[in-house]
Amino acid sequence: MLALKNIQILYDRAIEAVRDVSLEVPTGKIVALLGSNGAGKSTILKAISGVLYQEDGEIMSGSIHLEGEPISGRSPRAIVEKGILQVPEGRALFATLTVEENLLMGGFTRSRAEAAEGLERVYQMFPRVKERRTQISGYLSGGEQQMVAIGRALMGRPRLLMLDEPSLGLAPQIVDTIFEAVMSLNRDNGMTVLLVEQNAQLALQTASYGYIIENGRIVLDGAAEKLRANDDVQEFYLGFS
Ligand code: ATP
């Protein structure tokens, strides 16, 4: 579904954040992009969602194709309309708006009826979000905010959902709820997912394929079970020694 080829990204015309990255996300799969802080994961997501070219000095080369069609250089809105929706790191909710208002923001490209239907789907998936729907988003727990952020992306009816560090800073129980929801979206709705995570354990249990990025380069990729069995992955990412 999504294919990146030889992507190179510079910040400030000089800092090489991403070097010669090629990766594929096949239709109906969950693919994980793993790596430590500053490895270049968020930069890759920004390139896909079209928010990268907004600032001076950001330069990208290489190609990004969605189902064979080139999409690099398109506006963020055009990318959303093509069905690629991102849940940003840190959730980025409108903190002074209610939960439902935030969700409706995610449905802005949709008709009224579709938005109403979307709300129902989100509330069914996350009953906790339904309970909180009239509350101001800024007062929610981190886990609840992550659910709202995912819900907001779902309102746009993604074909490809990109999640940037969904587990960051959350209690284990709520992380389970969130990852179960992601797996059910994939299993039951056939949603394709690109999952960016620092938590390799979690990511490799969820995804079927993984890429490991270090200093802007893909250093290893393979089926999730193969990566889990790899000595280097166990030592550096899964904490076994
Ligand atoms: P994190 O988990 O901390 O978000 P990451 O793997 O997503 O890490 P990126 O945020 O993509 O990493 O950053 C990759 C590199 O690019 C880092 O060296 C970072 O310092 C640099 N970088 C990121 N954003 C900018 C920017 N706006 N201007 C200059 N350098 C940047």
Image (cartoon, rainbow, N blue to C red):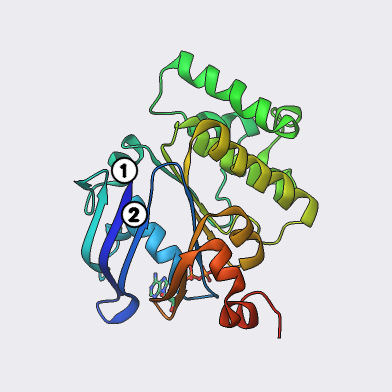
Q: Secondary structure at mark 2?
A: helix
Residue type at mark 2: give it: Ile
Q: Looking at the rendered structure, which numbered label has been put on residue 165?
A: none
Looking at the image, residue 194 lies above or below residue 186: below
Q: Earlier in the sequence, mark 1 or mark 2?
A: 2
Judged left or right of residue 241, residue 38 is: left
Quarter of the picture holding the C terminus: bottom right
Count residues near mark 1 (Cα–Cα under 10 Å), then give few for <14, some for 14-19, many for 20+.
Answer: some
Above or below residue 56? Residue 91 is above
Decide: few, some or many residues near mark 2? Use Cα within 10 Å; few <14, some 14-19, many ≥20: many
Q: Amino acid at mark 1?
A: Ile
The secondary structure type at the circle numbered 1 is: helix
Question: Which residue is labeled 2 in the image?
Answer: 48
Q: Is residue 148 depicted above or below 127 in this figure? A: below
Q: Residue at x 52, y 28 (%)?
A: 104
Image point (46%, 18%), residue name? 114
Instruction: Give the residue at mark 1.
Output: 79
Marks 1 and 2, how far apart at CA: 8 Å
Q: Residue at x 69, y 37 (%)?
A: 136
Residue 170 quadrant: bottom right
Most foreground residue, 1 or 44: 1
Task: Mark 1 and mark 2 in contact? Answer it, CB < 8 Å.
Answer: yes
Residue 27 on image: x %, y %: 39, 43
Asked if disc 1 is less than 8 Å from ligand 1, the answer is no
Q: Is residue 145 visible?
A: no
The N terminus: image quadrant: top left
Q: Position of residue 68 (x, y in %)?
A: 21, 46
Q: Quadrant of residue 9?
A: bottom left
| Quarter occupied by residue 198 | bottom right
